[in-house]
Amino acid sequence: MKPTAISDDGNQPMTLLQRLQLGSLIISDGGTGTFLQDNGLEPGGCPEEFNSSNPELVKKMAGEYFQAGSDMVLTNTFGANIFMQKKYGYGEKVQEFNRLAARHAVSQASRGHIVAGSVGPTGEFLEPLGQVSESGMYEAFAQQVSALEEGGASAICVETMTAIEEASLAVKAAREHTNLPVIGTMVFDKGPRGFFTMMGVTPERAVKELQNAGAHVVGTNCGNGIGNMIEIARLMRESTDGFLAVHSNAGIPILKAGRIVYPESPEFMAERFKQLADLGINILGGCCGTGPNHIRALATAVGR
């Protein structure tokens, strides 16, 4: 394990932002859903419910990522907002699931490790496209991030967003209801005219508007293998000299012998993670299809 980064007072571990400001590369974790599905989560099941019913597995996930070389792990709270949890019948459990998830990850952290509270989309559209008001969506995110901070999270990661309006509300809620650094990432598709989210947002626009909303770190996650992620990262780096994060899928999933398989191996991704580090990406990790072995290969590739 690498030495712990210590703050100037020689006592407290450095925060995420302090480490980034000193030029440290932060290694994040791999896929949460992938890990849980490999360890008993049924298709269509509620991952966040495992924070209550299967705490040892959630702890094991965080522990394995830290042991593989992660400086930062995300909590098992991607869908732990009131809108998503109502669909599973757990609307009253939102705060409990978020607090527990943060506590489980923190229990596996050593001095200097970072636990980032994962905040995913609500699955709803804002008015007039949908039925949810801006204030209603903002309050949902405020409820979630407050519980994550109460549980001990040391950062917030707003991720897998496609609508800039929703992403911005989540970032603002995190800035205004916690004292934690905030990461904001969006998911892009590649088309004939370049990269856009499902709602038409370019990487360049995402950088600008997420930063305007208050995100300390911006970037991209999910939806692409690491080759496309390098292209997106270049566009983002050309748009800002601020902090950037990339969480890449292990390729685009394929169906093989009746199973969904992500084709990019730890070794394949490791070489390209090094390219992302050379581009000046500040936080590197995996998303769908990646696991502890991918993070171990990433850590080796960047000289850990």
Image: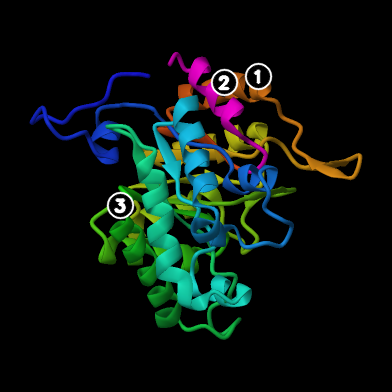
Which mark's residue is nearer the viewer, 2 or 3?
3
Disc 1 marks which residue?
Answer: 267
Q: How many marks?
A: 3
* Quarter-of-image position of residue 237: top left
Whichever of callouts 1 and 2 sits on the residue coming sooner in the sequence is 1
Q: Which residue is depicted at the point 67% across and 53% down?
A: 41
Q: Where 107 falls versus 69 (above or below)?
A: below
- Residue 29 percent across, percent down from the top left: 50, 37
Which residues are drawn in magenta? 288-304
- Residue 124 percent across, percent down from the top left: 58, 75
Question: Label 1 amino acid?
Answer: Glu
Q: Is residue 183 visible?
A: no
Characterize the local packing of mark 1: few (<14), some (14-19) or many (20 or more) Cα atoms within 10 angstroms.
Answer: some
Q: In this rendered view, identify the residue nearer to me: 113 or 230.
A: 113
Instruction: Tell me: 17 left or right of 195.
Output: left
Question: Label 3 amino acid?
Answer: Gly
Whichever of callouts 2 and 3 sits on the residue coming sooner in the sequence is 3
Q: Where 178 falls versus 278 (above or below)?
A: below
Which mark's residue is nearer the viewer, 1 or 3?
3
Name the mark on residue 47.
Answer: none
Q: Is residue 3 visible?
A: yes
Q: Secondary structure at mark 1?
A: helix
Q: Secondary structure at mark 3?
A: loop
Q: Where 199 falls versus 2 (above or below)?
A: below
Q: Find out whether residue 299 is within the magenta segment.
A: yes
Q: Secondary structure at mark 2?
A: helix
Disc 2 marks which residue?
Answer: 297
Instruction: Tell me: 304 left or right of 60.
Output: left
Disc 3 marks which residue?
Answer: 152
